[in-house]
Image (tube, helix red, strand yellow):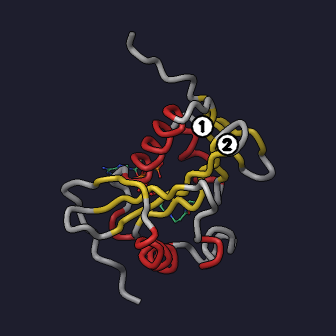
Amino acid sequence: MSPEVRRELDYVIIRPHSPDDQNAIEQLHLGNWPKSNSKKDSAPEDLIPEPGETVFIAEDSIGEMVGCIYYFPRLVDVDLHGLVVKKACRRQGIAAELIRVAEEQAQRDGFVRITIEAASKKLVNYYQSLGFSLISNSRKRLAKDIGTKQFAV
Ligand SMILES: CC(C)(COP(=O)(O)OP(=O)(O)OC[C@H]1O[C@@H](n2cnc3c(N)ncnc32)[C@H](O)[C@@H]1OP(=O)(O)O)[C@@H](O)C(=O)NCCC(=O)NCCS
């Protein structure tokens, strides 16, 4: 298979998903989720958002889906998972931007912590570079304290 031609993006917008996005989300995962990663998060039945769950979608200037992240509010924190970026659009900060948008949403929703599970040691380092700390070495699980949003009075 020939490598995908790298695409430099002018800009990306990030928005919450709608039901119409489900097919594109599945295609994004199918074509860009590494075979070596666990099946978790990549099987079509696992890609249907749970009630209360949001998928943040990154879209390029022509409306093509280039990345996404699942945002699942729990009792005490928000679990982020299913993060994927189209191969040809990587290393431009799209994943970091998706995480930033999810973090801001978590603050608006009143949470003080977000968590994520890394698929590899390299991704542990990547999430640490974004301010996460390891909370379970065996599961490569990380958390980030996001404090409470300061509202101007
Ligand atoms: C992991 C993944 C989501 C990262 O997506 P991404 O959009 O490329 O991520 P970013 O651009 O934010 O950062 C990736 C790297 O590019 C670097 N980078 C960011 N912007 C850059 C730019 N403008 N130019 C060059 N490099 C850049 C980052 O510093 C980071 O470097 P590092 O790997 O040395 O830490 C993507 O590789 C992917 O979809 N992988 C397959 C699915 C997967 O494993 N998901 C995670 C499950 S836990």
Label 1: which secondary element: loop
Q: Is label 2's Cβ within 8 Å of ligand 1?
A: no
Q: Which of marks 2 and 1 is nearer the N terminus?
A: 1
Q: Where is residue 80 in the image (x, y as percent from the top left)?
A: 59, 50
56 horizontally vs 53: left or right = left
Residue type, mark 1 in image: Phe
The residue that appears at 58% across and 39% down in the rendered structure is: 128
Split into 4 quadrants, where in the image is the C terminus?
Answer: top left
Disc 2: CA contacts within 10 A as few (<14), some (14-19) or many (>=20) = many
Residue 114's place in the image compared with 48, above or below, is above
Q: Position of residue 111 (x, y in %)?
A: 60, 32
Label 2: which secondary element: strand
The residue that appears at 57% across and 30% down in the rendered structure is: 110
Rounded to the nearest whole Å, what is the CA distance between mark 2 and mark 1? 6 Å
Q: In the image shown, does 109 or 142 lie closer to the viewer?
A: 109
Disc 1: CA contacts within 10 A as few (<14), some (14-19) or many (>=20) = many
**Residues marked 2 and 1 touching at CB (< 8 Å):** yes
Would you name the residue on which mark 1 appears?
A: 132
132 horizontally vs 75: left or right = left
The residue that appears at 60% across and 37% down in the rendered structure is: 132
Would you name the residue on which mark 2 appears?
A: 142
Residue type, mark 2 in image: Leu
Q: Report the number of discs.
A: 2
Split into 4 quadrants, where in the image is the N terminus?
Answer: bottom left
Q: Where is residue 31 in the image (x, y as percent from the top left)?
A: 47, 79
Q: In the image shown, does 102 or 52 lie closer to the viewer?
A: 52
